[in-house]
Image: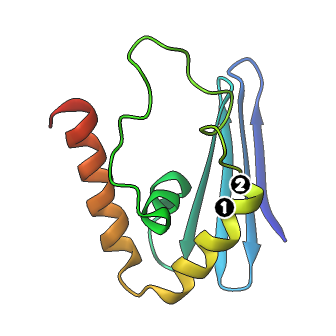
């Protein structure tokens, strides 16, 4: 079920929020970069990319050579259609999901920006 949609013309921004049982999804586009976030009720939004990497066991974040163009949407071989069911299963079965995603986000920042 779609719970909200917004489009801001001129900025290239679009947002759609959807609900599936106990989970909400937020799909957004900002200047041709797409993102997907998930959350359980009363919890913060969690980035699909971070969940996907946790589920896949990926521990490095530098997947791109500096100065090379960004992928059109997701890294090669990754799709929302194939990765989202695993992310949903993981989120539903992991009570510490919020903490794990926060740690992964910090690790990504440290690896990419040395912070």
- The percent position of residue 114, horizontal first and vertical second, equals 16, 33
Tell me which residue sits at (44%, 27%) in the image: 64
Image x and y of residue 113, in percent: 23, 31
Q: Residue at x 55, y 57 (%)?
A: 48
- Residue 81 at x, y = what percent? 77, 58
Label 2 packing within 10 angstroms: few (<14), some (14-19), many (20+): some
**Callout 1 secondary element:** helix
State whether residue 8 is above or below residue 52.
above
Nearest the viewer among 86 and 88 is 86
52 left or right of 83? left
> Which of the numbered marks, if any, corresponds to residue 27?
none
In this view, the residue farthest toward the left is: 115
Give how far apart the Cα atoms at labels 1 and 2 are.
5 Å
Q: Quadrant of the N terminus?
A: bottom right
Q: Quadrant of the C terminus?
A: top left
Query: What secondary structure is marked by label 2?
Result: helix
> Residue 101 falls in which quadrant of the image?
bottom left
Q: Is residue 47 left or right of residue 60?
A: right
Residue shown at 62% from the left, 27% from the top: 71
The residue that disc 2 covers is 80
**Label 1, on which residue?**
83
Q: Quadrant of residue 14?
A: top right
Q: Do labels 1 and 2 touch, CB within 8 Å? A: yes
Q: Is residue 101 above or below residue 89?
A: above
């Amino acid at each position: 079920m779609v719970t909200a949609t917004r489009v801001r013309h001129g900025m290239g921004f679009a947002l759609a929020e959807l609900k599936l049982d106990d989970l909400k999804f937020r799909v957004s586009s900002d200047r041709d970069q797409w993102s997907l976030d998930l959350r359980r009720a009363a919890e913060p939004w969690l980035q699909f990319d971070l969940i996907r990497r946790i589920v896949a066991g990926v521990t490095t974040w530098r997947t791109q050579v500096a100065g090379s163009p960004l992928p059109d949407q997701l890294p090669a071989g990754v799709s929302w259609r194939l990765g989202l069911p695993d992310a949903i299963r993981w989120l539903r079965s992991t009570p510490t999901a919020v903490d794990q995603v926060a740690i992964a986000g910090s690790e990504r920042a440290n690896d990419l920006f040395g912070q």
